[in-house]
Image: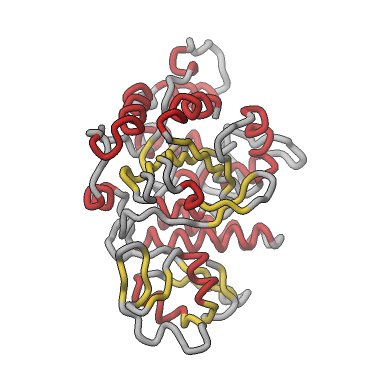
Amino acid sequence: MILTELRTTAEAFAHATDWYPKPEGLCRGEVCVPAPGALSSDGMIDVAVAAQKLGMPIVQDIEHGVWALGSATLSGKSLSTAVAADPELKTFDGTPFKLSSLRGKKVVLVAWSSY
Amino acid sequence: MPGWQALNEEIAKFGATVVTVALDIDPALAKPWNDLANPNHPSLVDTLHITNSLFGFTNIPMAAWIDEDGNLVRPAEGASIERSPLRDMEIPEGLPEQLNKMMHAVKAIPDDGEAYREAILDWVQKGSTSAFALTPGEVIARSQPRSDNEARATACFELGEYFHRTGENETAVKWWKEAHRLHPQNLTYKRQAWTLVTTPAGATEYDLMQGPNEVYDSNLVDEVTGEGGFGQFIIRPRL
């Protein structure tokens, strides 16, 4: 997630990380991490607090004033839950597509590239 | 892609589908291959390599299996489903050195294609009773390690993509080099970066050799052969 300040909307945070603010904390699947101070009453996320709770490194390009948020390290594994992430990807014609639109089907998700 | 297209047609009757996702910063270069296959399954693009972060893809081809309720039943792992004809090809004498090394490296790639394809067919028919469907705990345990360095690499790669997209190519290279340093086993981070500097301007296809260049200290053939072959970068499926 690219940031120009360490505050963003809860919606943008969830969109980029697949971690959603809920009453229990920041949640993905059945995993919820208490994160007091991460969500403010105006619906904004304090990214530094959220990142610290989720074990997400923040990397800054000082010269350009840009930050990037790394992935969560909670379990020490690439997955902290078996609930599949649901990022918004795009088809080749630019149409947004979410894997959750395929609920009810088994999905074999295959990564490939042209390089 | 054609192999996955054929498999999709085979598994559709069991209520299953293939979804392909191209890890490509520039979709225009992947699109001709996609159009050639004319897939009838969802065919997506991941310009940010966000699926590396969220699913653990570190190489291609890799796949993860998701059940009807949206739960992973196998984490990201190497996912060939057919034997490459290159493996059975006689390597001609007199090839340029880099191409010769590449051909030998390709022929030595571990071949799990048939077993992995059979495992998919078993799962789509038997569902959770398939011996290849893992429990949530097993899925997490078998997913790849994610240390602070590896998580930091995802951020560095995304910074590289951002600066590449905004025309700051030198800065992009700086961050991609850092991503490579932090997560050396992630071959997609490397191949994406190498190919951008070895593909001639205006080319309609990427340079697949990704050979020696003046920007990065490494390149595909030397890196792979130096590490002991493509197998060192493949997460072989434990079937």
* Relative vertical location of residue A61 with respect to residue A45 in this rendering, above or below: above
Where's the N terminus of chain B, which quadrant?
top right
Instruction: Give residue B14's position: percent from left, percent from top.
Output: 40, 31
Instruction: Give residue B118's position: percent from left, percent from top.
Output: 33, 24
* Relative vertical location of residue B237 with respect to residue B73 in this rendering, above or below: above
Q: Residue at x 56, y 40 (%)?
A: B42
Note whether residue B15 is visible: yes
Q: Nearer the viewer, residue B66 or B50?
A: B66
Q: Residue at x 32, y 43 (%)?
A: B74
Q: Going by the image, does A23 lie left or right of B32? A: left
Instruction: Give residue B50's position: percent from left, percent from top.
Output: 50, 55
The colouring scheme, among rainbow, by chain, secondary structure or one colour, is secondary structure
Q: Residue at x 67, y 58 (%)?
A: B165
Where's the C terminus of chain B, which quadrant?
top left
* Relative vertical location of residue B162 with respect to residue B142 in this rendering, above or below: below
Q: Nearer the viewer, residue B131 or B220?
A: B131
Q: Residue furthest bottom?
A: A41
Q: Residue at x 56, y 42 (%)?
A: B22
Instruction: Give residue B221's position: percent from left, percent from top.
Output: 49, 33
Q: Nearer the viewer, residue A26 or B150?
A: A26
Q: Which quadrant of the structure image shows residue A106?
A: top left
Q: Which quadrant of the structure image shows residue A93?
A: top right
Note whether residue B110 is visible: no
Say how many tags the image has.
0
